[in-house]
Image (cartoon, rainbow, N blue to C red):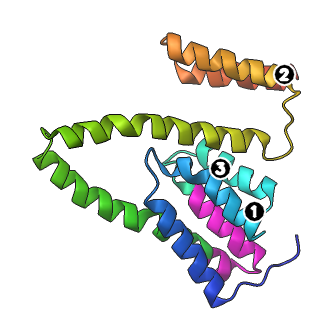
């Protein structure tokens, strides 16, 4: 990929976009990945599809909080702009953009909702957010599954995904066993 040129207004746009997404992170930062993809890959072309997917995959595989994929996306945007200094700037802007607004909002609203936990509106809001979180997670999974041209014709992978989801939903099998089974199936080339 050829180096991209980012001006001060572009860096500000990156920070403001992440700050806006921060307020939509119901269910975690990963739920906003579809809009990050739209902004970084489709609209601005600051990242490629493989860079986007790799940022999420590496951060999810690494120990620690899964919000780190935002730092990797900022790092990759900065690297595409040409230097380690811009990579560090991209990382700081994305992480502070995604963390600051939501952290402040959660702190203030959790104090208020705890004081008013018996109100019908507070209980209704908590119950109403569950389907929104599920829909955002499903759209993130769709973007990751189809982002690199991974066709729906790969029926074995889709069948494995469905079987795994059913096992997680209906049993108490530990997720690490399922990850290990998926790794073995991939290693043997069965999926």
Q: Is residue 102 magenta?
A: no
Looking at the rendered image, the disc whose residue lies closer to the viewer, 1 or 3, is: 1
Give the residue number, with chain letter if any, for mark 1. 41
Looking at the rendered image, the disc whose residue lies closer to the viewer, 3 or 2, is: 2
Drawn side of residue 158 relative to residue 16, left or right? right
Residue 191 is labelled as none
Q: Rate crowding at label 2 as few (under 14), some (14 to 19) or many (20 or more) other CA atoms within 10 Å.
A: few
| Residue 173 visible in the shown view | no
Residue at the (47%, 40%) spot, across then down? 132
Residue 162 versus residue 21 in the image, above or below: above
The residue stretch that appears in magenta: 69-89
Give the residue number, with chain letter if any, for mark 2. 155
Q: Rate crowding at label 3 as few (under 14), some (14 to 19) or many (20 or more) other CA atoms within 10 Å.
A: many
Residue 175 image offset from top left, x and y in percent: 55, 23
Q: Rate crowding at label 1 as few (under 14), some (14 to 19) or many (20 or more) other CA atoms within 10 Å.
A: some
First in sequence: mark 2 vs mark 1: 1
Residue 166 image offset from top left, x and y in percent: 59, 14
Drawn side of residue 69 relative to residue 83, left or right? left
Give the residue number, with chain letter if any, for mark 3. 56
Alpha carbon separation for disc pair 1 and 3 = 14 Å
Quadrant of the snapshot with the C terminus: top right
Alpha carbon separation for disc pair 2 and 1 = 27 Å
Residue 43 versus residue 66 in the image, above or below: below
Residue 79 versus residue 73 in the image, above or below: below
Residue at the (80%, 79%) spot, across then down? 4
Query: Secondary structure beneath disc 1?
Result: helix
First in sequence: mark 3 vs mark 2: 3
Proximity of marks 1 and 3: CB atoms separated by less than 8 Å: no
Residue 86 versus residue 58 in the image, above or below: below
Quadrant of the snapshot with the N terminus: bottom right
């Amino acid at each position: 990929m050829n180096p991209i040129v980012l001006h001060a207004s572009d860096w500000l746009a990156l920070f403001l976009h992440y700050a806006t997404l921060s307020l939509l992170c119901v269910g975690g930062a990963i739920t906003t990945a579809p809009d990050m993809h739209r902004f970084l890959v489709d609209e601005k072309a600051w990242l490629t599809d493989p860079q986007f997917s790799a940022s999420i995959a590496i951060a999810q595989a690494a120990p620690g909080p899964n919000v780190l994929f935002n730092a990797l996306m900022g790092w990759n945007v900065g690297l595409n702009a040409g230097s380690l200094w811009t990579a560090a700037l991209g990382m700081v802007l994305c992480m502070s953009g995604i963390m600051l607004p939501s952290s402040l909002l959660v702190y203030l609203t959790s104090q208020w909702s705890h004081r008013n936990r018996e109100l019908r509106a507070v209980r209704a809001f908590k119950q109403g957010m569950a389907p929104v979180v599920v829909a955002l997670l499903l759209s993130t999974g769709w973007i990751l599954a189809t982002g690199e041209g991974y066709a729906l014709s790969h029926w074995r992978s889709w069948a494995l995904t469905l079987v795994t989801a059913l096992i997680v939903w209906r049993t108490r099998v530990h997720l690490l066993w399922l990850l290990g089974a998926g790794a073995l199936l991939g290693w043997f080339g069965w999926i």
